[in-house]
Image (cartoon, helix red, strand yellow):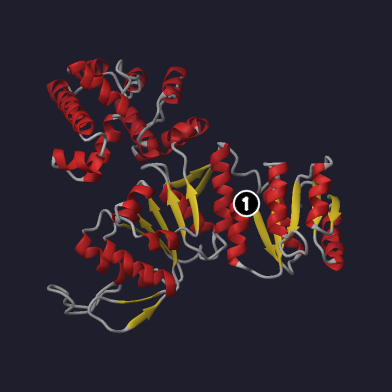
């Protein structure tokens, strides 16, 4: 049984109102009722502060969605669960966007009601994610210690049960694939296949056959038929990572799959129908990608049934100690080494650092610390540069490397990195920070440039500073 709570129950049907109230009072919840949205809003305006609102979606006067919106304006942190006799996906999505934390389809059993209340107001299940590591599968875990990530976790749990595409946004390394796995785990498809396709890692001319398969003779070397990822993932969930790197012609075919779940293998006229939940992830600038036709507008709006945006690690620093300890525990087992201490100096350096590479950078940092075993060296790696850019002062890094086992090779590597950072800064300044033009000027790919900007911690202020200093 969940802990007792003050609950506001809003429903225009007297019989349903009595039924749900009885279920709640069996568990000693304190229940206030309202038969209209206006009455519910009036009670909250007059000082009622419930722990949870159970709100009927379809009511005369102001309906459930309008009531939800007004209640959330009065009390932004108010938790509301929608009740409906129809599973209307469109309205469920609207409710989620307005801040609903869950929904129940009438008629429901007491066990279903208890589970939702427990998840919303606490108890063994509801509090198990606060500041703790949630294991998803081998070496994949989800942490929700910050308010932003707790909200993401709540939204993921809600959207997991609604069969709509979800677009996952966030900087590189923020954990978009982990969030996709969480949605899959919490969905009715959890016991089915989860597949990830990195659209940037597969050459454009092979991506179509990778996704949709091919028949024998479809192209040179196709000696036998092969099913694609969509066939292999039937009844399951597929994550299309780096969706912004997918060629426009292939985006059109994907749009067709999203519309009616059908496609044909390369070299075949036979239509295949599948039932696949599609999640998509990207770190691109969406408005820029739409403006340059890099991402089809119709595909974007089809994928954007619901969007979850992961904040960068620098905006959820309360999770850094948890992540450091967890990575240290995992990696010490993997490398068969005893875990190293995370002292105050190192922890403070980690909390000050901006982590441009997010969780991926933090993971690699722990690997280096575990291998080198020098806490002061690890902390110095995170010290800011005098010019305000990057992740470590070159002098400290060079001395530390030379004093360990790097020698002249490390000195050479540091000099090369500095020269690359300087060249990139100049190219960005020359192109007024147009990254595509800068990549062309440097004769490297756009993706490689983005990686190096993050690697060297190049910011616009840093670029300007360097050029003015060298002028």
**Residue at 71% of width from left, 41% of height from top?**
75
Quadrant in which the C terminus appears: top left
User: Compared to 385, does 151 lie above or below?
Assistant: below
Which is more toward the observer, 116 or 135? 116
267 vs 53, left or right, is: left
Q: Is residue 238 visible?
A: yes
Q: Is residue 145 left or right of residue 116?
A: left
At a point 28% along the width and 72% down the height, the residue shown is 213
Q: Eyeballing the image, is 436 above or below 203?
A: above
Where does residue 404 sit, x and y in percent of width and height?
A: 22, 20
Question: Which image quadrant for residue 279?
Answer: bottom left
Q: Secondary structure at mark 1?
A: loop
Residue highlighted by disc 1: 98
Task: Residue at 19%, 45% (x, y): give it.
Answer: 445
Residue 395 in the image, given as x and y percentages of width and height: 23, 15
Say whether residue 291 is left or right of residue 9.
left
Quarter occupied by residue 437: top left
Task: Tell me, yes or no, if residue 229 can be seen here.
Answer: no
For this orientation, the residue located farthest to the bottom is 270
Please state the horizontal and vertical placement of residue 90, each as a whole percent of the image.
58, 64
Quarter of the image for residue 355 reads top left
Q: Position of residue 372 (x, y in %)?
A: 29, 26
Bin the neighbour count of mark 1 within 10 Å (Cα to Cα): few under 14, some 14-19, many 20 and up: some
Q: How many marks?
A: 1
The one of 444 and 63 positioned closer to us in this rendering: 63
């Amino acid at each position: 049984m969940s802990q007792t709570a003050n609950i506001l129950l809003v429903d225009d049907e007297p019989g349903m109102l009595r039924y749900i109230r009885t279920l709640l009072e069996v568990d000693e919840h304190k229940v206030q009722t309202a038969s209209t949205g206006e009455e519910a809003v009036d009670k909250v305006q007059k000082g009622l502060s419930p722990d949870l609102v159970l709100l009927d979606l379809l009511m005369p006067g102001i309906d459930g969605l309008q009531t939800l919106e007004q209640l959330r304006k009065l009390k932004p942190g108010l938790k509301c669960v929608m009740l409906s006799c129809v599973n209307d996906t469109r309205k469920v999505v609207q409710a989620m966007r307005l801040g609903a934390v869950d929904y129940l389809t009438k008629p429901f059993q007491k066990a279903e009601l208890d589970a939702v209340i427990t998840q919303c107001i606490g108890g063994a299940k509801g509090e198990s994610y606060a500041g703790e590591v949630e294991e998803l599968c081998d070496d994949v875990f989800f942490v929700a210690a910050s308010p932003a990530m707790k909200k993401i976790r709540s939204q993921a749990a809600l959207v997991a049960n609604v069969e709509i595409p979800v677009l996952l946004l966030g900087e590189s390394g923020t954990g978009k694939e982990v969030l996709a796995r969480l949605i899959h785990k919490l969905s009715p498809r959890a016991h089915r296949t989860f597949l990830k396709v990195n659209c940037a890692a597969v050459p454009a001319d092979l991506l179509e056959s990778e996704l949709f398969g091919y028949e024998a003779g479809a192209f040179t070397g196709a000696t036998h038929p092969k099913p694609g990822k969509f066939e292999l993932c039937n009844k399951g969930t597929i994550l299309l990572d780096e969706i912004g790197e997918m060629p426009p012609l292939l985006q059109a075919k994907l749009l067709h799959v999203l519309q009616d779940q059908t496609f044909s293998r390369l070299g075949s006229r036979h239509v295949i129908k599948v039932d696949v939940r599609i999640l998509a992830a990207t770190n691109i600038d969406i408005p820029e990608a739409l403006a340059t036709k890099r991402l089809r507008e119709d595909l974007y709006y089809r994928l954007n049934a619901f969007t979850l945006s992961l904040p960068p690690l620098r905006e959820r620093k309360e999770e850094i100690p948890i992540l450091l300890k967890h990575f240290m525990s995992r990696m010490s087992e993997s490398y068969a080494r005893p875990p190293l201490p995370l002292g105050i100096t190192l922890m403070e350096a980690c909390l000050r650092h901006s982590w441009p590479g997010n969780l991926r950078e933090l993971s690699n940092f722990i690997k280096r610390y575990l291998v080198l075993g020098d806490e002061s060296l690890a902390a110095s790696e995170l010290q800011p540069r005098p010019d305000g850019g990057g992740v470590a002062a070159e002098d400290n890094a060079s001395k530390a490397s030379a004093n360990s086992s790097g020698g002249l090779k490390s000195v050479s590597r540091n000099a090369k990195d500095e020269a690359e950072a300087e060249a990139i800064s100049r190219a960005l300044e020359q192109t007024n920070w147009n990254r595509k033009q800068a990549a062309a000027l440097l004769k490297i790919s756009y993706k490689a440039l983005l990686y190096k900007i993050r690697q060297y911690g190049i910011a616009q202020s840093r670029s300007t500073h360097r050029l003015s200093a060298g002028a």
